[in-house]
Image: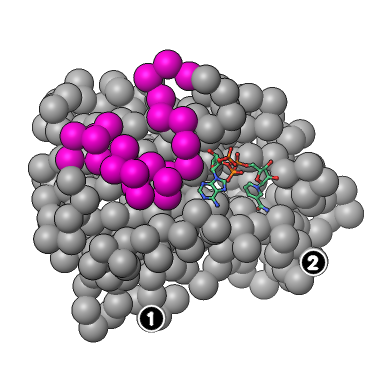
Amino acid sequence: MESLSESSPLTLITEAESASAPRVDHRSAAAARPRYTTETVVDVRYWTPNLLSFRTTRPASFRFTPGHYARLGLCTADGSVVWRPFSLASAAHDPHLEFLAVLVPGGEFSDLLDRIGESDTVLVEKSSYGFLTIAHFAPGKDLWLVASGTGLGPYVSILHDPATWQAYDNLIVVHSVRYSTELAYRDEIAALVHQERLAASADRLRYVPVVTRECCPNALAARIPRLIEEGRLEHAAGITLDPQRSRIMVCGNPEMARELRRLFTERGFRTNRRAAPGQLAFENYWT
Ligand code: NAP
């Protein structure tokens, strides 16, 4: 994780990686000074039958920057462990860790995750990773947090961080989902503006829901790239996309990310590089 690239070399929540992912023997790894801690599930919340958030205990030594992801391991019946990267949705100061996940039919990790409940065990690697953090941007005025599906997860953590509110005048959350029930954290995001510790205010936070497969009042109804091309996203947010002032994170569907990279590049935005901080940062959730 040395180079400051626009997206992490790991894609997140990749059931596709299961074929090539190393299967670690839990017992021998533990004997050789494990790189992970053993945590306990304290809560599981289902937004829909295949979309859930789960919370675990947090080791006192675990530190992360909002926007980072952690690698989680679930034990199989034969004692091996299946690992997947998951963005942290919890605040940096939260005594627990929280993650947002979609259950992928037939996925090895998803099958294990589908069965977890309170008191079950999750392994958490001791380090966190990622480039989807506000520190990777040059200063700007407006922070656009653009997500599809579970790509919202890291933004929940970023939005809970007082540093985010100090760094930007306006925060714009754009969340595209298929059905309105998948608008996870909608109420929590709305409630942020009442948190005194954030010095947040309603006029600085724009929440733009996008629901693509059913009619939903107060939500936009087309894919995000099209909404941008037609000017409808800026209109809904009441803010112009401008390389001078906008800093944009994109997280979720990799095809959406590719399309948005092209669109924003055409409009003069540049991806973050080590030598030249840009205005764009991407995280793909699967390949
Ligand atoms: P999704 O299919 O990406 O849909 C979320 C939102 O993104 C929808 O509004 C969708 O619009 C939109 N979208 C899809 N493709 C787009 C594109 N090319 N450009 C712009 N917007 C696009 O994700 P999801 O609802 O979170 O998950 C759906 C399925 O994805 C899961 O059931 C699972 O099979 C798979 N998934 C797999 C993994 C994995 O690790 N392999 C991880 C997460 C999800 P439309 O309604 O128009 O499609």
Image quarter in which the N terminus is found: bottom left
The residue furthest right is 78
Q: Nearer the viewer, residue 260 or 131?
A: 260
**Is disc 1 surrounded by few (<14), some (14 to 19) or many (20+) residues within 10 Å?**
few
> Which numbered dot is residue 3?
1
- Ligand 1 neighbours mark 1 (CB distance < 8 Å): no
Coloured how? one colour
Does residue 73 appear in the picture of this structure? yes
Which of the 4 image quarters holds residue 192?
Answer: top left
Does residue 59 appear in the picture of this structure? no
The residue furthest top is 217
The residue located at (36%, 39%) in the rendering is 174
Q: Which residues are magenta?
A: 216-239
The residue located at (35%, 76%) in the rendering is 4
Question: Where residue 111 sits: x, y (%)?
Answer: 79, 42
Compared to residue 199, the image places residue 83 above or below, namely: below
> Which numbered dot is residue 247?
none
Which residue carries the number 2 mark? Answer: 19
**Is disc 2 surrounded by few (<14), some (14 to 19) or many (20+) residues within 10 Å?**
few
Q: Amino acid at mark 2?
A: Ala
Question: Where residue 205 sits: x, y (%)?
Answer: 21, 32
Which of the 4 image quarters holds residue 147?
Answer: top left
The residue located at (48%, 42%) in the rendering is 223
Residue at disc 2, secondary structure: helix
Question: Where residue 82 sits: x, y (%)?
Answer: 73, 57
Q: Nearer the viewer, residue 274 or 24?
A: 274
Evaluate if marks 2 and 1 touch, with contact meaning CB atoms under 8 Å apart: no
Whether residue 219 is in magenta: the answer is yes
> Label 2 vs label 1: CA separation?
26 Å
